[in-house]
Image (cartoon, rainbow, N blue to C red):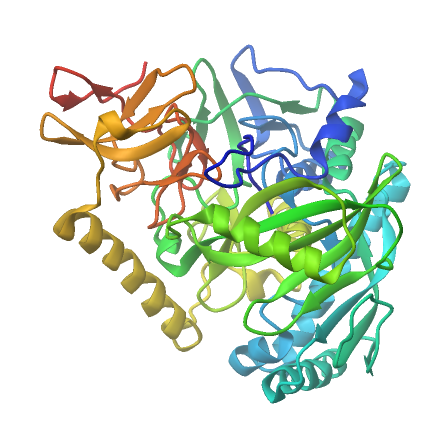
Amino acid sequence: MDADETGSETSRGLEARQSVWHEPTLAGESADHVFARLTSDLRVDVAIIGGGITGVSAAAQLMRAGRKVALLEAGTIGSGTTGHATGNLYATVDSRLHALARKWGRGKIAEVVKSRTAAVAMIERNVFEYGLDCAFERQPWVLYSIDALPAESDDIQAEYHAALEAGLDVRLALDLPMPYSIRKALVLRNQAQFNPLQYVRQLAAAVQSPECQLFEYAEVVGINEAAMQLRTSHHSVQADHIIMATHVPKGVNAVQTELGAYREYAVAASVEREQLPGGIFWSTGARPTSTRAVRIGGQAYILMVGEMHKTGQHADPGHCYRVLDATLRARFDVQATAFRWSAQHYRAADGLPYIGPVSRGSKLRYASGFGTDGLVYGTLAAMLLANDICGVDNAWAALYSPQRFTPIKSAKNFIRENLNVAGQYLKDYVQGAPVQELGCLLPGEGSLVEIDGSKVAAFRDESNRLQLLSPVCSHLKCIVHWNRAERSWDCPCHGSRFGVDGQVIEGPALQPLARYSPGARRVVESQE
């Protein structure tokens, strides 16, 4: 889970805040966890874009292999996707093993489970080898139904058989130690949980050295594959190999036609007494949720995740928070909802991530398509990418290779996602995206407006000042939509997101939204 915007509660709905992991972690952070800024050009063996679990884990692997590494993070280490995850680690997958088996076969699913189990073991080794204080614990993963619906029971039964065939230690149960009744449950033993932000920042601090440099506030604005060079606003980094640990490949890449961008929401409420044991609890049904207990600084919380939708394609994202909050309160005796945030993930057309070179023989590599299983897949990606760079054979490299050809496995989702993108172009360009009068824009709100015949993305801050931007996404020219809950401009086509100032928050876009120049009747092409 990830979200990078903060906000406050208003009469118009619930706005996002930082995740449950952020405030206490950053407030109590030691000087050892402060990372440098890039102040000069560099030449290294491997340059990594992105300071989440994929990038930092890859840096650790490559450092141990004797490579000189530079990692460039646009914000702060771990503050993006990783710092907004649930902290759940498991060998199974969010789309269900039995569904994946129908595409890939039982043998491939066993390899998926083995590879993910190895990634969880790698996280556990790092915790103990580096002495990371991140609340790592072995806990069960549970899939359960509340309603007595045949489809839910069948889903659990099918997952049970798929898990057994994949070699997992599972059992069926008819009750759980929870404050509400369940109908049926699948319990997978020996999975894990941790604090993802503490893990990745402490791992980064442990491996940083003159040979493994990690830089914060070093946003990459240009990638030159031919020259193997990264460019920030003021400096460049030359490398023999480049890893895009950015959740989705930056710039324009053909694989983006095989990825769907989705957002999911989370709320965490404080509780006076323990009501949920340790573990990962996934419910089945039409509106599935993921629930876990969390303890931060002596305070107990219950965290609930759900309400997934395509990025930029929900009219009222705040409604997702309200639904989750109501569900949490219906199931548990909670106090104030202390945290709420959303996260973005990308789903691959054939159900497995893409991890490896952007093209055969390329030294530019990426990892994407993790779904909501990113903490484990991100660690696995670091293992595969580091092995590839170091010339070490890995048994799972072909399974996750971006060069795999899977037209039958991909067809249904590929067609659906690309029809969805085409529909967004049609709606916003041909039919016309809805606009409102600029004078009706309230403080703290954003909307598409029309000024002198031009469509403009406008935001009015609490001091009544306007930010006027081009609504055209700098990636592939879709029209961005206002996200009230996150205070961001979200692209409904490929998931790029921009702040109210137009700066890139996440997604494939490298360049900010252009500024609109009032009176000139045109959009300024550069924000510099």
Location of residue 83 (image quadrant): top right
Towards the viewer: 127 or 278: 278
In x, y percent, where is residue 172?
A: 81, 82
On the rendered image, what quadrant is the C terminus found in?
A: top left
The residue at 37%/73% (across/down) is 411
- Residue 478 horizontal side relative to residue 353, left or right: left
- Which residue in the rendered view is the most extreme toward the top? 39
Towards the viewer: 357 or 194: 194
The residue at 50%/45% (across/down) is 365
In x, y percent, where is residue 494?
A: 37, 49
Towards the viewer: 165 or 480: 480
Name above or below for residue 105 compared with residue 270: below
Q: Does the image show residue 348? A: yes
Name above or below for residue 84 compared with residue 71: below
In x, y percent, where is residue 476?
A: 27, 43
Location of residue 120 (image quadrant): bottom right
The residue at 65%/47% (across/down) is 267
Name above or below for residue 394 compared with residue 271: below
- Which residue in the rendered view is the most extreme toward the front? 11
